[in-house]
Every structure is written in structure tokens, then in C-alpha cells.
Image: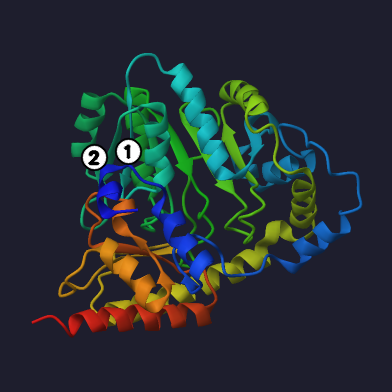
Amino acid sequence: MTKEETKNGARESLIGFMSNKVKSGGGINLAQGLPGFDPPGQLLDELNSLTHNDLHQYAPGNGNQKLVDQLCRHYGTYQLKAEELLITQGATEGGSLVFTYLKQQIKGAFSCLAFDPVYETYEQLPRIFGVPFHAFPLSDDLCIDFSTLEPLIKKENVRIIFINSPGNPLGKVWKKEEFDKMLALSEKYNINLILDSVYRELVYDQNTKAYIPLDTNNPRLFYLNSFSKLLSITGWRIGYLICNKEHMRRIRNIHDYTGLCAPSILQEALARYLEKYDFGRVYIETLRKKITNNFTLMQFELQNSGFKIPAIEGGYFIWAKLPGNIPLDGYDFAINLYDKEKTAIVPGIHFSKAGDRYVRINIARKEEEIRNGLIKIIAYANSLNSFCP
């Protein structure tokens, strides 16, 4: 894949492209959001105990009832009901279902929006359906200029907005005040908000939990989450969607003819684990601490080497700007870094037209791998500096 193809949008995913380099050529994979940690041992024990049970056929389309009940209890403060929830094949399928449904419901031409830098699915889903997409830039302090956002919404008839908190690739955590302003705009202009919260539990400040305005009485809110990153089981593909029951009834009809159901035996193992182990509380807290420690380590070392790191608050990734004296953009830096040091990261241009000097680095790996990756990234950056006048 060339840089020109990437900039013109005629491309495969650069995340997959860089990750596949490691799969075929070896090395350190800090590109794809693959956790470097084992799933909970108790969860694997539950799965092992089920292999000879009668759980190898289709699961109920709406989801394993015990898993649905667990989620309803987990979101008890929001008074969640089973008819407002759907188990999906990861949060990605949930988002695709919502977009497919909304494309049918919204009359006339409209556009979509997400906040720059943009996770790839938010841009590619509209592209697949031929819907215009806008990447709205954050201010230097990662705030949202609502005085600029509102005229754009009105001018371009924005009817779908994706919000990721904590974000990917930039780990911004949305504040309640920001959500309140967005909800007001949603009501004023009849905007559908797709809230992607797969990193919600992975906020670095142990005293903070990412706020979500979950309200199934609001027909413009669609909430996505997943167990993939939370329990280090990205290959299980079990996520869920929460929304108003009238929307859910019709979305389930689409799901019946596209995804049908998430894997039966995996749902059952997950339901039993969550019930026995307090929704994975101990594992999740341990995971959060590991990722927070990795973030602190990588932030310190990269900044000491001239990289610039914005105020990241959570999630799986470092969003880093290359040192000013490096004569390459992020694309060439990432490609050459793998060729020379066998370490894969993702060029920032994949997430933002303004991201040509940025790279994204996965920090949800074992500390030893993070340290080895840092050594190679910094060594390559220093080798470039040595050729600068």
C-alpha cells in the first residue's frame, strides 16, 4: 500500500497492513489493538467445562439469557431492561447494525461526523453506504468548540455522530458537561448519537470512571460496548448494543438476517464467569493498572526523546507526534521502523488528514514487550536525528 493510496482513501486498513507485517515477518506488534495479556483463568476454566455440553448450535438471536441478565444487573442504575439490549458479534457489529438501521430511517440526504483523529470504522461505515463524513477537529487542549460545531451540523445536515470515550486513537475521556451540550444539540437537530464505550473501564486515573449518558428513554442514543478488550478476548467477538426498545425491535430484525447470533458456547462461559466473579472486577482492575503503568512508562520515555504526547486519559493507545527534527512523516517513519527494527506501529494519517506527523502505538502489551518496543522506536528516531543538520 502506498502513501498516496492512503491519503486518497483507496486503501485497506493500515492497522491490518502493519499488523500483517509482523504476522508474516515476525517482530513486535504495537500496531493492532491486540491485548498482550491472557484472559482470566477462571473464564477459561468455565469454557473448558462446557466443551462437551449441548452448546454448539445457534444461540438465541437476542443473546444468552443469563448473559443478558448479567448486563441488566451491571447497568442497574440505568434501569436497563432485556428488550433494550442485544448481544452482538463485538461492538463493531453493533455499530454496523445501528448504521444500517439509521440509514433506512433517516429521510433524504444527510451526513455523519466524528471527532478527529477518527477511529477507522466511524469513517468507513459512511463511506460504504455513500454517506458524506466529517472529521471535526478538537482544540489544542482536546476540548470541543461547540460554537463552531453547531454551524457545521446545521449546514451539512449531520444526523449521526460517533463518540468514543475513552477514544481511539486519542484517549480523550468525555466530560459530563461535554455530553450535556452534545445531548442538547442532538435534541435540537434530531441527531443520533452512537456512543462507543469499549474502553470505558480503562481510565488511567483510578478515581475516575468514564461518564456515559446512558438513557434508553432517549430515542437518539445508541450505546455500544464489548468484552473484547475488557477481558482480553478479542477473538471471542462478544459485544452488546443498548438502545430504546422501539429501535431495538427493528434492529433485531436486521440482526436476524445478517449476524444471527454471537457464539453460543462463548456467551455461556462468559455469563457463568461474570456471575461467579463479580463481573470480572479483580481482573479488570489488574488490567487497568497494567495499562496505566505502560502508558506512564511510554509517555515518559517518548517525551524524553522529543515526541509530543497530548493529554491522554484512558484506552489502549499512545497518540504521539514525531520529534520536530525527524525528516520523515508518520507513514514513512512507521514503514521504515518495521523494516529496520521489526516493530510495527500505525501511521497517524490512517486516523486523520492532519495526522501525518503522528503515530499510534498499542500499550496494552506485557511490560517487557513495551520496553523492547520503546528501545527500538527510540533507537530508530535517534538514528534519524543523527543525520539532521
Foreground: 379 or 76? 379
Q: Are marks 2 and 1 in contact (CB under 8 Å)?
A: yes
Quadrant of the drawing holding the C terminus = bottom left
How dense is the environment of label 1, judged by Cα within 10 Å: few (below 14), some, or many (20 and up)? Answer: few
Above or below, comparing residue 299 to residue 137 in the picture: below
Q: Which mark is residue 150?
A: none
User: Left or right: 228 with respect to 368?
Assistant: right
User: Residue at 32% across / 63% down in the picture?
Assistant: 359
Which residue is outermost to the left? 389
Residue at 67% over, 26% down? 256
Three-letter amino acid code at the position of disc 2: Phe
The vertical placement of 339 against 316, above or below, is: below
Residue at coordinates 30% horizontally, 29% vertically from top-left?
Answer: 132
Q: Which mark is residue 181?
A: 1
Task: Please name the amino acid that badge 1 sits on.
Answer: Lys
Residue 91 lies in quadrant: top right
Callout in the foreground (2, 1): 2
Please tell me which residue lies in front, 26 or 380.
26
Q: Position of residue 199 (x, y in %)?
A: 50, 55
Q: Which mark is residue 146?
A: 2
The spot of residue 330 in percent (x, y) is: 27, 63
Circle 2 sits in a helix, a strand or a loop, which is it? helix
| 207 lies above or below 16 | below
